[in-house]
Image (cartoon, rainbow, N blue to C red):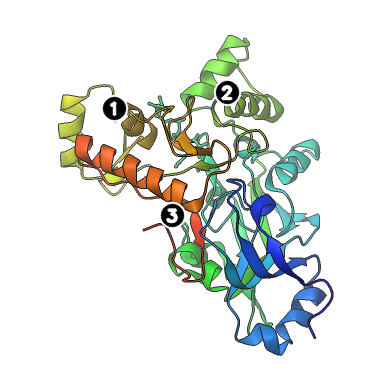
């Protein structure tokens, strides 16, 4: 018999910020490593599909799931120590990311302030290497622990082994997260003791300048970031969404130059590898999709990259809109867009097709 913390036939609508409806055959909130160990010992768990869920804020629920959804709610955060260069902090996977950032700031360990307000959990943060306003979690990752859901063994991963990239990591690339092979249980961060303000993102610089702040404190940066996010990204509790729905596309320098020639306003960011990153939001807006709906889904009127559920949207609505937007952008600019969220589906596919 399954342990009593495992529920069955659970509606996943409250567990994904796009509020797409579907049921999980089994649903287990995980609040301790003992619960995980208990589950791993169950014969029903051994051969079943698994999905490791964090805050559900980068998730597309594609339909009913016949396996186990493990919702990581492991609590705990602590100071591990410091050396000449860094302060080291550990947080369990279930901690809310933004609350963790606020705790570091309140405790006098700055560094993560640009990342305040990002929804989701600490354990999910490295999977797509969350980033915003000139910083990403990979800048601060020291190591993490992942539990092998078959053997029950805890495996250490140094930051380099996680192979983090733009909205990407080993875990996302290899589909480990989706296959349910591993669950990240704890993440260790290193915050440079020689703190430097990161204010290169123009919106932050403008916000601070407007308030007459020339040498911002970490708290003032966090405040500016929070204000910027509130202007652009809708609160999922009011308007369900999963943040940016597409990645910013990287194209060849040649294509970027041609596009820039035709559209001088197109935001372009040259990358170290010679490619150029374009602003997907700009492409979507100029393909005519900003603020436009299809069925019960739409692209947000304040940030064209954010796909929103206008009320009662289905996975099919989201897919139809995603396809229409990608087709429009490709037809106008010749640039393919890739969806950012991971997909929870029985088929186990990685991203939307
Ligand atoms: N823009 C438009 N139209 C819009 C919105 C933006 O033309 O409707 C232009 C802006 O003028 C700007 C450019 O597009 O020049 C980029 O926009 P923005 O700075 O708002 O950021 P983004 O590239 O759209 C990325 C991340 C966000 C992160 C912000 C801030 C991705 C996929 N998204 O968005 O992350 O908060 O930068 O750093 O990289 C997320 O991943 O879910 C997410 C919200």
Left or right: residue 37 compared with residue 163: right
Q: Residue at x 50, y 67 (%)?
A: 161
Quarter location, residue 36: bottom right
Query: Residues under labels 1 and 2: Cα distance?
Result: 21 Å
Of the numbered discs 1 and 2, the one sitting upstream in the chain is 2
| Image coords of residue 104 (percent x, y) | 75, 42
Ligand 1 within 8 angstroms of badge 3 C-beta? no
Query: Which one is nearer the viewer's eye here, 21 or 116?
Result: 21
Which residue position is annotated with label 1? Answer: 266
Report the residue that reaches farthest toward the bottom.
43
Left or right: residue 214 compared with residue 342: right
Of the numbered discs 1 and 3, the one sitting upstream in the chain is 3
Please tell me in which quarter of the rendered image ligand 1 is found: top left
Query: Residues under labels 2 and 3: Cα distance?
Result: 27 Å
Residue 18, placed above or below residue 127: above
Of the numbered discs 2 and 3, the one sitting upstream in the chain is 3
Query: Which one is nearer the viewer's eye here, 40 or 222?
Result: 40
Ligand 1 within 8 angstroms of badge 2 C-beta? no
Question: Considering the numbered disc 2 on the image, is that residue within a helix, a strand or a loop?
Answer: helix
Which residue position is annotated with label 3? Answer: 165
Q: How many marks can you see?
A: 3
Left or right: residue 350 compared with residue 97: left
Quarter location, residue 252: top left
Residue 347, placed above or below residue 189: below
Question: Considering the numbered disc 1 on the image, is that residue within a helix, a strand or a loop?
Answer: loop
| Image coords of residue 74 (percent x, y) | 77, 62
| Image coords of residue 241 (percent x, y) | 56, 41
The circle drawn on residue 231 is: 2
In this rendering, the label closer to the viewer, 1 or 2: 2
């Amino acid at each position: 018999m399954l342990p009593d913390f495992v529920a069955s036939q659970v509606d996943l609508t409250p567990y994904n910020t796009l509020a797409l409806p579907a049921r999980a055959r089994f649903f287990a909130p995980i609040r301790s490593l003992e619960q995980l160990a208990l589950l791993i010992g169950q014969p029903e768990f051994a051969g079943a599909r698994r999905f490791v869920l964090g805050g559900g804020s980068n998730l597309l629920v594609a339909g009913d799931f016949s396996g186990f959804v493990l919702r990581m709610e492991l609590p705990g955060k602590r100071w591990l120590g410091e050396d000449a260069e860094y302060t080291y902090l550990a947080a369990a996977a279930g901690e809310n990311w933004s609350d963790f950032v606020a705790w570091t700031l309140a405790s006098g360990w700055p560094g993560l302030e640009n990342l305040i307000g990002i929804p989701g959990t600490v354990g999910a943060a490295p999977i797509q290497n969350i980033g915003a306003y000139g910083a990403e979690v990979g800048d601060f990752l020291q190591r993490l622990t992942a539990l092998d859901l078959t053997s029950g063994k805890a495996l250490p991963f140094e930051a380099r082994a996680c192979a983090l990239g733009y909205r990407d990591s080993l875990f996302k690339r290899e589909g480990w997260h989706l296959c349910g092979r591993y669950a990240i249980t704890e993440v260790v961060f290193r915050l440079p003791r020689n703190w430097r303000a990161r204010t290169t993102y123009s919106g932050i610089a403008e916000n601070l300048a407007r308030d007459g702040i020339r040498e911002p404190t970490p708290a003032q940066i966090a405040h500016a970031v929070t204000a910027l996010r509130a202007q652009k990204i809708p609160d999922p509790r009011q308007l369900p969404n999963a943040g940016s729905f597409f990645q910013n596309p990287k194209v060849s320098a040649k294509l970027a130059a041609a596009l820039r020639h035709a559209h001088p306003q197109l935001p372009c960011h040259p990358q170290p590898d010679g490619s150029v990153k374009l602003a997907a939001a700009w492409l979507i807006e100029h393909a005519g999709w900003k603020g436009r709906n299809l069925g019960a889904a739409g692209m947000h009127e304040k940030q064209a990259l954010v796909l929103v559920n206008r009320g009662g949207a289905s996975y099919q609505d989201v897919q139809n809109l995603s396809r229409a937007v990608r087709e429009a952008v490709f037809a106008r600019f010749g640039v393919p867009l890739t969806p950012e969220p991971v997909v929870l589906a029985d088929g186990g596919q990685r991203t939307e097709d």
